[in-house]
Amino acid sequence: MESAPIISGNTDWRDWLASPPGRYILDWEQGQFDAAVADVFGFYALQCGLPQLDCLRANRMPSRVHARFLDDVADQLDAPDASVTTVRLAHFEELPFDSQSLDLVVLPHVLEFAQDPHQVLREVERVLRPEGRLIVSGMNPVSLWGARQVAFRRLSQPFLPRQGGFIGPPRLRDWLKLLGFELDRGRYGCYRPPCRTQQWLDRTAFMENMGDRWWPICGAIYLVSAVKRVRGMRLIGPAWRSKIPARARVGAATPQRVAIVPNARGEAPRAVALSDTCSDASAAKE
């Protein structure tokens, strides 16, 4: 019977994943990734890092790419799929893909170990097409595992490797919103206490259902899915000036001719309009 590797804060991340708690979170994440990517459609999908998981195995896109570090194993599958391509990268801050060329990007525990996680997200936003999907998994600092990591960092060996840094879901949510992503779903899991042996992990298995019901946001692992949104723009024609409606014509005042009519009684003569004189004359004839 092989003894489980002894893990401590100085243990490498890959060695830690081979330990009982590492296999515990890998089993949970594999099921969550299978459910998250099953209904994501498109042509090109990318998984960055973590060769211990095949996050795209349930996806049906014709072209799937696994980006690995230079010293990572190429493939963990027993029968490699011909549609899966492996590329080697020194880091994920610069991705060798055209802008807006991918439909799905998966980052399992990539941001925690990246030198510049903001730049990784900017690169992902660049290569994703509009309405493309990003799925991120990471360690939750608001959990029993996170509390033990912080509390015993100076007193003893921490439970998780020292190389990684916790990035909480609220912090990640703010980063994604600044880049134009819209979060559509999230999931927490792994509610068992931070035990180093498989025996104690099995004894505390009853805490899975309790944690999912009573403290759902305190799972050791979280998985966040977001969609890249691009604001649409509608082109409109030039704003031609509308015709000004013609104003109502104003009648011009016509000057009247005035005749001086002498008064028979010796009074001062008075001015009478010719139109009035004509009307009086026509009335006299009648």
Image: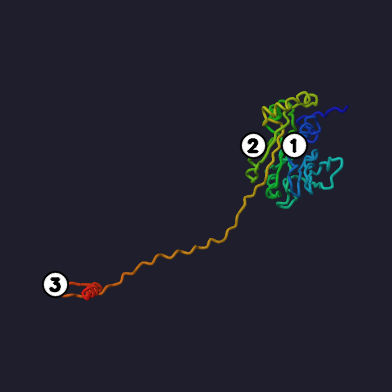
User: Quadrant location of the C terminus?
Assistant: bottom left
The mark lying in front, picked from 3 and 1, is: 3
What's under tag 2, amino acid-wise? Pro
C-alpha separation, residue under disc 2 versus residue under disc 3 = 104 Å
Picture coordinates of residue 55, whole percent (x, y): 77, 40
Q: Residues under labels 2 and 1: Cα distance?
A: 20 Å
For marks 2 and 1, give the one nearer the viewer: 1
Give the CA distance from mark 3 to mark 1.
116 Å
Give the residue pinned by disc 3: 268
Residue in the image at 12% along x and 72% along y:
267
Q: x and y percent of residue 12 in the render?
A: 78, 34
Residue 124, placed above or below residue 153: below
Q: Name the residue at 79% across, 39% down.
A: 53
Give me the residue at 68% from left, 30% from top.
Answer: 216
Q: Identify the mark nearer the N-term, 2 or 1.
A: 1
Q: Where 154 falls versus 267 (above or below)? A: above
Report helix, strand or loop for mark 1. Answer: helix
Q: What type is the residue that disc 1 sits on?
A: Gln
Residue assigned mark 2:
170
Q: Quadrant of residue 175?
A: top right
User: Number of marks in the image?
Assistant: 3
Q: Residues within 10 Å of mark 2 (few under 14, many from 20)?
A: few
Label 3 SS? loop
Which amino acid type is shown beneath numbered disc 3?
Answer: Ala
